Structures are given as C-alpha cells and as structure tokens.
Amino acid sequence: MACCRSCLCCQCCCRDTETRTPEELTILGETREEEDEILPRKDYESLDYDRCINETYMDALEGMDNKRAKKYEVVKWMLVFAIGVSIGLVGLFVDFFVRLFTQLKFSVVGNSVEECTEKGCLALSLLELLAFNMTFILIASVLVLVEPVAAGSGIPEIKSYLNGVKVPGIVRLRTFVCKVVGVLFAVAGGLFVGKEGPMIHSGAIIGAGLPQFQSITFKKIQFYFPYFRSDRDKRDFVSAGAAAGVAAAFGAPIGGTLFSLEEGSSFWNQALTWKVLFCSMSATFTLNFFRSGINYNKWGSFQLPGLLNFGEFKCSDGDKACHLWTVVDLAFFVLMGIVGGLLGALFNCINKRLAKYRMKNVHPKARVIRVLESLLVSMVTTVVIFVASMTLGECRDLSPATTHNSTEAVNVDVNSTIRQFFCSNKSYNDMATLFFNPQEVAIHQLFHQDATFSPVTLSIFFVLYFLLACWTYGVSVPSGLFVPSLLCGASLGRLVANVLKTNLGMQIYPGTFALIGAAAFLGGVVRMTISLTVILIESTNEITYGLPIMITLMVAKWTGDFFNKGIYDIHILLKGVPLLEWETEVEMDKLTASDIMDPNLTYVYPHTRVQSLVSILRTTVYHAFPVVTENRDNEREFMKGNILISNNIRFKKMSVLTRAGEQRRRCQSMKSYPSSELRNVCDDQVPVEPTEEGQDILQQMLERRHIPYPNLYPDQSPSEDWTMEERFRPLTFHGLILRSQLVTLLIRGVCYAENQSSATQPRLSYAEMTEDYPRFPDIHDLDLALLNPRMIVDATPYMNPSPYTVSPNTHVSQVFNLFRTMGLRHLPVVNAVGEIVGIITRHNLTHEYLLAKLRQHYITI
C-alpha cells in the first residue's frame, strides 16, 4: 500500500509539473528538469540608481550653494583617492603574507625532499606538504563558514551588483575580512586558485564601505557622515573600487576602468570615468611604491606595478634573427583562439555540472561538509602534484643557455626557481619546476625560459592543471580564476611553440606563443574582450602585442559563445540572479510594455491612515508603491463627508495639469512684465469660462469619463467579492514611494490627526530620511502602541513625483534600454489619460521571463 501511495504521489507531482507553463515556472523561479535550467529568483532586490527628487530633496538642494557643491565634489575625489590607496595597501598585505607562507612551505618541503631522495623517506616529505596545505585550506574554509559570500572570486556577485542587483552581504566588512585573510591562505595552501579575482571583490567592498564611515558588523565603527547615502553614490564608489582591484592585481589602471565599464555598470558618464580612472591609478602606484621599496629596497623606483607582472618580452641582444611575432604567426594565433574557445567551453561545462552537483548534494547538508570537501580537494591536489613531479617529470640538464637575457628584466631569478627534486645535482625536474613554484613564477618560466620543458611534461601539466583547477573553482574557499587560467593556457601555448620550433623548424619566440595561449584560454573561460585585451597589454608593457591579443580573444569568445556562456555568467545564472544583458533580442519587439507588466498593483493614497499602511507593509513584500487617487463620480459630495477623502480629492485636483490652466498661469505671469509684447501675448486668447468652484470644462470631463465605482475609503482593503471592474478600477498616478520611506515615516511618527490640517504633520529632512541607509528599519520593528491607527500620513512630500514612465504600447526594446541605461528599480506603465495600468521591475525584463511571454504571445496568436 505504501508503494502504491508513493507511486500515486509521484504521478500527481509529475502531472502538476507537466501542466505548468514556462511563464508559471519563470514566475515561481523553479527549475525545468527536462532542460536542466535554473530560472531567476524573485527574492533579489534591485538597486535604485534614479534620484528621488521629492520635496525633501529639493529642500536640501536649496541649502546648497555653489561653494558647498564644490566642497561636496572635492570630498568625493578625496574619498576616491582614499579608496585607491586602501586597495593598494590591501594588495600589499595579501602579497606579503602569501610570499611569506609560500616561501616557508617550499623551503621546509624542499629541504625534506632533497634529504629524503637519498634516504628513501619521500613519504615523510609528502606528509609535511599535506600538513602545510591542509592546515592553510582549513583556515580558509572555516573563514568562508563565517561568511559564505566570501567563497569564490566574488566577480559574479560584483558584476550583479554593478548591473543593479543587491546581493545580500557582498559588501559587508565581515565579508572583506574573510575574503582577504581567506584568499592568502587558499593561495599559500597550494590550491589552483589566484588572488587577483578576490582583489576585485575586496576593492568593491572598500569602495562601498569607506564613504559610509560605519559598519553593520562592528557597531562601534560609526561616524556621522550624512553624504553619499544612496544606491546611486554607493554604486559609483563600488565601480571605482572594483576597477582599482583590477588595477592593483595586474598593474593595469586603464584595463581596470574598462573592466568596470564592460562587465558591470549599466549607467556611466564622463565624471564617473575620471573618478574610476583616478582611483585605479591611485591603487596601482600605491602598490607599486611599497612593493618596489620592500622587495628591492628602491623606494620611489616603481618597478612592480601589480601583483601579477608578465615581465618584458624581448629578444636576446645578439640574436638578430629573433622576432616577437610576424604576420605569418597570426594564422596560428587564430587557431589557438579557436582551441582556447573550445577548451574554455569545456572547462565551463564541466564546472557548471560540478556546481550543480554541489548545490544539490553538498550545500543542503551540514556546513562542515563544505570544509571536508575543501580538504579533500587540497589533499588530492597535493598528492597529484607530488606524485606527478616524482614519477612523470623529466630530469633535464642545466645549462646557461636555457634562459633568455630578458629574464633579468623580468626581475625573477630563474635559476633560484628551478627545482631539482628527485634529480641529480647537474639536472632539474621540469615538472617540479612548474608545480613547486608559486603560480606567478611558473607563468614567468613559461613566458621567459627557452628549451626548459619537454612536450610530454607540458601536455601532462596542462591536463592535470585543467582538471584540478576546474574541480577547485567552486569549493568553499576564496578563489580567483585569472591566474590558473593564464597558467593553464600558457602551458598549452608553450607546447605549441615547442612543436613548431622543434618539429617544423620555425623561427619563433616561444614566450609570445605562451602569452597568446594564456590569452586564448582565459578568453575562452571568462569571455571578456575589451578590458582583457588592455589588461594583458598593460601587463606585458608591449603595445605590439595589441593586435594578436585582440584577435585571439575575439576568436576565443566567438568560439566559446557557440557552446555556452562565460564562467561568471554561468555562476550568476546558477545563483538565480536576474541579470540584464546589454540589449534584448530583435524578436522581443513583438511584445509591448502591456504584455510584460504586472497589472496587480498594491498602492497607497497621498493621504492614508496608519492602520492601512501597516497592513500593506506587513502583508506584502513589494519595495515600492504607486501613489494614486481614484476617479469618482460626485466628488464634491464625498469631500463634505470625510477629511481623508477630501484631502485626497483636493490633492488630485491640484496635481491635474491642463493646457488651459497652464496657459492662464503663464498669461498672468507675462502680464507682470514691463514689455508690451509680453503683456499682449494673452490678449487675443479666448478665455475659458470657469464653472462653479473654479473647475474648468476639461476637469469636469475627466471626472465624468468613468462610471461610478464602489465608494471606498482609502483605508479599506480589497474584497474577494469585487468584480473585475471593481478590482482593476481606474487610478490616477501621482508618483512612487519606497517601502523604506513609508517605514521611516511610521517609526518617526510622521502623521497628523483627522481633525487637523495636513500642514500640522511633522516634516523630516532629506538627511533624516536617509540616516539609516543602507539598513532601513523593518516594519515589524514598529511599536503600534505608540501610534494611533486612525492617524493619517501625508506621503506627498516624500514620494517621487516624477519617475520615469512608459506607455502601454512601448516596445520591449525601448523599455529595456530605458530601464537598464537609467538604472531603474521600478518602471510604472501609465496610459494616455494619466492612469497607472501596471508596473515593470527587473524580473519582468529577464531573458527567461521575456521568452516565456513571447511563447505565450505566439500561443495567443
């Protein structure tokens, strides 16, 4: 019987799933098992880049003259400089301790390997290496347990934030501490991860937190600083911080600026470009100054611009036949771009399946399972590199001719990084030279050493590194993907160079092919074009590489996009973030705003009772509410009966603008001018005969254009007995007000009694309204005993009276461009007579939602 019941339940569940339309699945945010697709979640909140220019904002502007405005701008530039310097110092901190722990580990393990090679106790050396690596990874993984958002590179989350999505916890101080400390232990622990990606996340956190002068994590860190307390200002600072993180990581301030523009920010202007570039420059030169002074004791020499430097690519002085690249090499670069795109697509496909497996089988379980998985990855990685170096590496003879003269310019002592593990004194282990060095040093080896690595070693290294890096990205440690991808691609490019030079006898520069291979694989994984091209050019300090790098990245991106998306976009989709692309597909223009809007509105009135607001705020999860008035018949009769209705009707009449009324106002203004021409402009106008109580004919027509509806008070709730016409009755749109604003008004007791005028209501300033940003109080924190539920709240001074709106007939491409370009959070749909008929949010513009609506459109046709 139990079996039968379970079968029946399974059949019912399957039947329910089959009957759901794609639109319903999109709205519910569920997964379509047959397509294995995760749809955007509905619980992500959007940022509001648009200014709320209400009465309190205008009052604040009136108190700001030109001198104060200039001081405000100077403070902004000073904060941008402080953000850049702070990011440079954070990069210095991470680099110093990574080097310290890595040198300590390799020195101890290296001495042990040399001793145990003769004594036969290599198992002891392996245990020492395991102890170091697993201890470091345990610390990094425990820090991620403290703040789970600190896992990974953080670039998907920052990209989502700059796109306009508020991902919880990504810019908190606790996340910053766990990220910075965790990444240095993860890199020192030998995992195939980089510190460059987390530097971008750390920079964004500094950009978000430093101008606020307060911390949610540490309550005592709080200073009164009433400026830059909006999503608009915060998002600009995050853009600057993220760009400075790229600049500090690669020594590429221009590339960092382009990264912030290409990968994230939907809204951009010239002033923001200057600030972002200045912040990136500040971070680059701060890190360069201190690293050059500490490492080479040459303060002020500026020799190390970033955490990762590719060095100088140049031929030996005596080799006149050498060239960095030729036109003939471009054909091979295109082929490498195709291969890089294919391998990048394979990497992303495997990593996506691993991420889905973790979401289903690791994350739902106890949090300690994540730590155990990180330790398992660390153990397997350590054993693989040790065994591969011991059994698969080739012992090659040491000779002075194995290095280019350019190695000295690279500032790396190549001989000191060559590992002789498991080989005699006059030879070195080429596999151990790659595995038992920091990843940046291994990249230098592949870029600037000649005749060092055999094709077999490079092939094995590439396969092992590819698989282990793919498995590692996604475990519960802070981890970057730039350096592992560069190293993996550099080994592939160096393999191609060895084949062309040895087997085909071509005169080529191996370092160039290693660089192009690194660019091809990295481009195939992350699918970046403009910013990545400039980053690599700035890192190499060789402008002649611009064309081959750009061609390689474009080919790699086109090839990879044929199969799947970039790795960061894949992880954004896996998290269900409603990301908006740069533009919609042409086919989507078959839809209009009325097709995708949500007509079920929860609204408030200009004057609403406290009990109604509390009920709305506690029973809904919406973050904004249209401020509306109803179109009633015989409004003068209602005005006599209730002060609340009277105030709302009076506000509606005052806000209705007619052409005749506006012309009368202008004529009255013109008649006050001394010029006879201005005085006589209105002389020939036919006056509009006012009706009783000053109402013109157009206003009477507006009042009579709808049939009468149930005479509801603004504090009454909708009834299930209402007809469709009653539920969706016409509503005149006056503006938008945010949930946070309403809650602030209620908690601060901003209301007036029914027997009083609305002028008696207390008035809050703009600084008081934004004082609690970004953690506004919750409606459940309101003590109802302190408020009279019959009191009335006048929301008109605090609402946004002029938000962006669209017509119901506006095509989706126009709606999408307006929403994304202006960084909107809510977009009301208003018809030709000023009535709100629906509202559009970010979730109505996601690709999945538009696709579902398009399918529904075809079915309807």
Image (cartoon, helix red, strand yellow):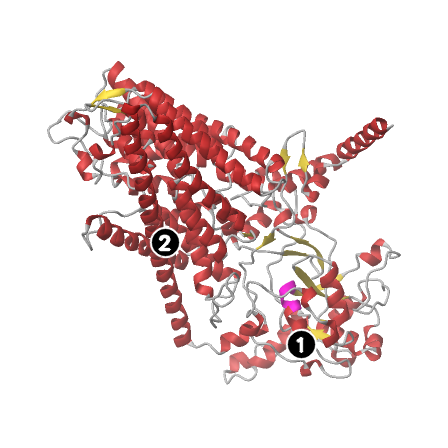
Q: Residue furthest right?
A: 721
Q: Which residues are magenta?
A: 736-743
Whether residues under marks 1 and 2 lie with C-beta atoms below 8 angstroms apart, the answer is: no
Q: Nearer the viewer, residue 496 or 369?
A: 369
Q: Quadrant of residue 600?
A: bottom right
| Percent coordinates x, y for residue 314 in the rendering | 19, 34
Instruction: Answer with the quarter of the image where residue 423 lies.
Output: top left
Q: Position of residue 220 (x, y in %)?
A: 49, 68
In depth, the one of 530 and 622 nearer the eye is 622
- Residue drawn 73% across the image and 62% down it: 618
| Residue 824 visible (yes or no) | yes
Position of 169 compared to 195: left or right? Answer: right
Residue beneath label 1, please? 750
Q: Earlier in the sequence, mark 1 or mark 2?
A: 2
Mark 1 to mark 2 CA distance (whole Å)? 44 Å
Inspect the magenta stretch and tell me whether residue 479 lies in it: no
Circle 1 SS class: loop
